[in-house]
Amino acid sequence: MKIQIVTLFPEMVEGFFENSIMRRAVQSGFVEYEIIDFRRFATDKHQSCDDVPYGGGAGMVIKADPLCKALSSIEAQSKRVVYASPSGKRFTQQYAEILSKEDELVFICGHYEGIDQRVIDLYVDDEISIGDYVISSGEVSTLVIVDAVYRLLDGVISSDSLSEESFHDNLLEYPQYTRPETYCSKGVPDVLLSGHHAKIGQWRLQKRLEKTLSHRPDLLETASLDANSRKILNALKEHSAKGTVDDGCY
């Protein structure tokens, strides 16, 4: 996948591609990236890229001209263009999976009060919100989307790891433990030390259902649960209603 990021602050983005799993993905050829500083396309002597909003109001708005020129320079009109914005569609794991099927993605990083609507009308295919809150940096929200998408590319992360993560099958992930076996008087659950794979699998499923029921019950409304999962969930709901806790497997 080729990822192009159009931004006023390229230094905020560059480090992301040079570290951790993304660095390996780039080195292995799974990801190609380009960072475009659209300030270079401003035509006045101060290279200004923002101006006051028509109609009045606080803050500044990113101007259409330098941003559109930057997008035109990379032929963005023939690619899928994403703009992270609080007023966009809600970003989900399913949305990330859809975007991961693209060969090329262009991301526009907004700032201040946002970008001129005409840029959105001319170029943007996906206006996406990463959550019901506002942040000052379009670079940060853009990288959230990029991170969720690129890791789904074949070869970047093992399929086994992806299949057990939060939101797979609309369930949250089970708790994880590693060495030492005891830390601050807290031990690892016995079942994880048993070597009994079937029991471990059942415990992990129960914990996924338990955490989803506690933290994100809305996800269970569309989760595809088999008979075993449904039985465990019903038992959890019953214990929850009684105000009891059982760490065993149902």
Image (cartoon, grey):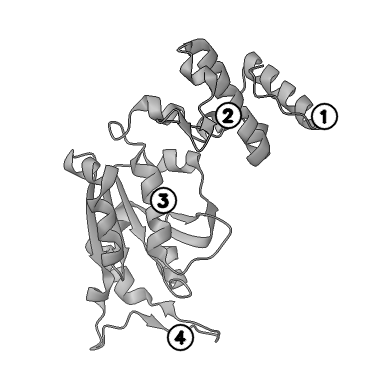
Evaluate whether residue 174 shows in this view: no
Q: Nearer the viewer, mark 3 or mark 2?
A: 2
Contact? badges 1 and 2 (CB < 8 Å): no
Which mark is nearer the camera, 3 or 1?
Answer: 1
Give the SS element for disc 3: helix
- Among the two numbered marks 3 and 1 on one chain, the one whose residue lies closer to the N terminus: 3
Numbered badge on residue 242: 1
The tag earlier along the polypeptide, 2 or 4, is 4
Name the residue rendered at 50%, 27% in the picture.
Answer: 188
Q: Quadrant of residue 155?
A: top left
Q: CA distance from mark 4 to mark 3?
A: 29 Å
- Residue 24, how many percent across, how many down? 22, 41
Give the label, 2 or 4, closer to the camera: 2
Report, in whole angstroms, how far the alpha carbon at label 1 lies from the one at label 4.
Answer: 58 Å
User: Identity of the amino acid at label 4?
Assistant: Val
131 left or right, relative to 64? right
Q: Tag 1, which secondary structure?
A: helix
CA separation in Å, label 2 and label 4: 49 Å
Residue pointed to by mark 4? 52
Q: Estimate the x, y position of residue 82 in percent, counting from the top left.
A: 40, 55
Alpha carbon distance from label 3 to label 2: 24 Å
Q: Specify whether 232 is left or right of 159.
A: right
- Pointer 2: what residue? 208
Q: Are marks 3 and 2 in contact (CB under 8 Å)?
A: no
Query: Which numbered disc covers residue 145?
Result: 3
User: Observer-nearest residue: 71 or 161?
Assistant: 161
Q: Residues within 10 Å of mark 2 (few under 14, many from 20)?
A: many
**Number of dots carrying numbers:** 4
The residue positioned 36% from the left and 50% from the top of the image is 146
- Does the image show residue 207? yes
